[in-house]
Amino acid sequence: ERTVVALVTMGGAPGALTDPTPQFPSGRTPADLASGNGHKGIAGYLAESALTSHLSTLTLKETLQDGHGSAGSGKRDTITFFDSGMTHLNEGGLEDESSLKDSLTAVRNAAQAAARIHQVFRVQSFHRKKLIEYGDDKCGISDEQALSLISFKGQRTGQDEPVHFAAIRIQKKFRGWKGRKEFLIIRQRIVKIQVDLSFTDFWMHSRENLSSCIHFPFE
């Protein structure tokens, strides 16, 4: 663990890939290798470091393309936001409290990274729709405006269509094998009741007709 932390701290690439093999055509990351050998903690740390490094690169590229500020400022903001929290390993402390803090920090970083990636994809999808709709590269909508429109649309969809979402939940419930099995049993019982009632009505009607025709009490 100390060796891995030292290598990553000195600039090692946690997202590097091995040579492709027939079993793994895309190669394997250090996190995959550590997980395959049973080192779950090291695998989680390497995966978090790879994600942090990748997002730092994206921030640097975006800053350089937009021209807002210097590249160093973009990297500093990202590293501050995704603090690895592994300083206890360098100090030689492997107490339960520090391990718990590191685990919580890793979970928080992963959740925030996933939220940021999902947000970027939604904004890009929104811009693509506008480009198709207007046929112009300059839609006049910034990323902040697009994100606000997407968030407002999501809130309105949840408030204005409760019946639609209720129908979707019912459909999802009955699409499962358990819900469909219960539905078929209930339908079979209903059909049986309907058949019994129809046969009873037919029998009573036939009995009245026979009694009126024969003029003999039908018993």
Image (cartoon, rainbow, N blue to C red):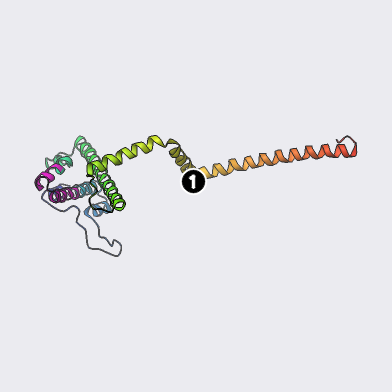
Question: Can you give x and y, in whole percent of width and height, for residue 96 in the image?
Answer: 21, 36
Choose between 49 and 144: the one closer to the eye: 144
Query: Could you tell whether 151 is left or right of 198 in the image?
Result: left
Choose between 88 and 84: the one closer to the eye: 84
| Stretch in magenta | 53-77
Question: Can you give x and y, in whole percent of width and height, for residue 160 in the image?
Answer: 40, 35
Query: Could you tell whether 185 is left or right of 51 in the image?
Result: right
Query: Where's the C terminus, which quadrant?
Result: top right
Which residue is identified by label 1? 175
Which element is circle 1 on?
helix
For this orientation, the residue located farthest to the bottom is 22
Q: Please tell me whether residue 214 is drawn above or below residue 128 in the rendered image.
A: above
Query: Could you tell whether 32 is left or right of 203 in the image?
Result: left
> Is 70 a magenta residue?
yes
Q: Residue at x 67, y 40 (%)?
A: 194
Query: Could you tell whether 215 is left or right of 170 in the image?
Result: right
Q: Residue at x 11, y 43 (%)?
A: 76
> Is 198 a magenta residue?
no
Q: Label 1 amino acid?
A: Arg
Question: Can you give x and y, in whole percent of width and height, for residue 109 in the image?
Answer: 22, 41
